[in-house]
Image (tube, coloured by chain):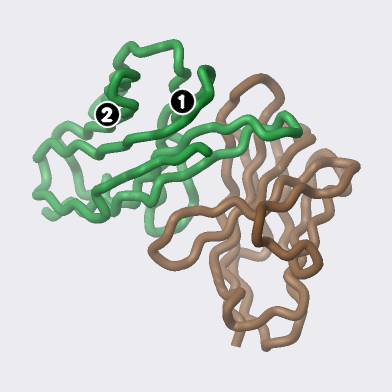
């Protein structure tokens, strides 16, 4: 069965520091997708990125960057020059193809990131 | 991203009553919607997959007779928590997935249920 592990339960840094959120996954599928979602205090999940298993290129979007390493089954997320507004719970997720064809998401436990001014 | 609405956003009810939560896909038609539950400071756990025009598929350990799901149209799925008890108090979130292979899911704003 698929599994996603986010070993860091909570991270607290000072504003402008860089911070990396770790994500390790397990799957037997050769084709899969990985996601990162942000959940601010309001509760609504915000989609950040989708990465398929065949594309190991790192991606950068503004202050956000993602490092996908298939060899270590990791999909880490780095925020550069963190800001207070980055404070949220971040979830890493793995898509799983169910018997009905729908792609179920398996979530990690989440990392609560606090950026202090 | 797609717009997904949930109603109500917050509900408080007495133990033993039933509560209906609506999830609407505002941007596109969705043959598949998902219902998640999130307890405080925990991750999202999939409860069931809602299929338009057919029965929902429930995850192991989720009581289908307690959590009734109706996907009556391509834009609306409802979750009814029947005979709610305090342990059902949680944050319920729905998501929709556009057609196409391995597309991301778009999540609703969630419904916070408190059962007294």
Residue found 45% across the figure and 28% down from its top: A34
Q: Give the colour in which the image draws chain B.
A: brown
Q: Which one is closest to the eye, mark 2 or mark 1?
A: 1
Q: Give the colour in which the image draws chain A.
A: green
Residue matched to label 1? A50
Residue found 51% across the figure and 60% down from its top: B38
Of pointers 2 and 1, the one earlier in the residue sequence: 1
Residue found 27% across the figure and 25% down from its top: A65
Disc 2 versus disc 1: distance between alpha carbons? 13 Å
Left/right placement of residue A3 relative to residue B47 reads: left
For disc 2, the chain is: A
Q: Where residue B94 sits: x, y (%)?
A: 63, 50
Relative height, residue B101 to residue B86 (above, below): above
Q: Where residue B70 sits: x, y (%)?
A: 84, 54
Relative height, residue A28 to residue A9 (above, below): above
Q: Where residue A9 sits: x, y (%)?
A: 27, 54
Q: How many marks?
A: 2
Residue found 78% across the figure and 33% down from its top: B29
Q: Quadrant of residue A105?
A: top right
Left/right placement of residue A27 relative to residue A112 reads: right
Relative height, residue A34 to residue B42 (above, below): above
Q: Quadrant of residue B51?
A: top right
The foreground one among B19 and B65 is B65
What secondary structure is marked by label 1? strand
Residue matched to label 2? A64
| Numbered mark located on residue B44 in the image | none
């Amino acid at each position: 069965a698929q599994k996603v592990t986010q070993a860091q339960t909570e991270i607290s840094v000072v504003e402008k520091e860089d911070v990396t959120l770790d994500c390790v996954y397990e799957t037997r599928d050769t084709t899969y997708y990985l996601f990162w979602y942000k959940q601010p205090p309001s509760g609504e999940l915000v989609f950040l990125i989708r990465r398929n298993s065949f594309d190991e290129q790192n991606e950068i979007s503004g202050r956000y960057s993602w490092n996908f390493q298939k060899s270590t089954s990791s999909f880490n997320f780095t925020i550069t020059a963190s800001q207070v507004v980055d404070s949220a719970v971040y979830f890493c997720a793995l898509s799983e193809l169910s018997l009905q064809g729908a792609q179920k998401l398996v979530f990690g436990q989440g990392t609560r990131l606090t950026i202090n001014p | 991203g797609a717009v997904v609405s949930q109603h109500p956003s917050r509900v408080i009810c007495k133990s033993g009553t039933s509560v209906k939560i609506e999830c609407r896909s505002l941007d596109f038609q969705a043959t598949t919607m998902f219902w998640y539950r999130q307890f405080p400071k925990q991750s999202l756990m999939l409860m069931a997959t809602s299929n338009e025009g057919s029965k929902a598929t429930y995850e192991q350990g989720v009581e289908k007779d307690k959590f009734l799901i109706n996907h009556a149209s391509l834009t609306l799925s409802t979750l009814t928590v029947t005979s709610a008890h305090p342990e059902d108090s949680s944050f319920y979130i729905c998501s929709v997935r556009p057609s196409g292979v391995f597309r991301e899911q778009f999540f609703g704003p969630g419904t916070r249920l408190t059962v007294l």
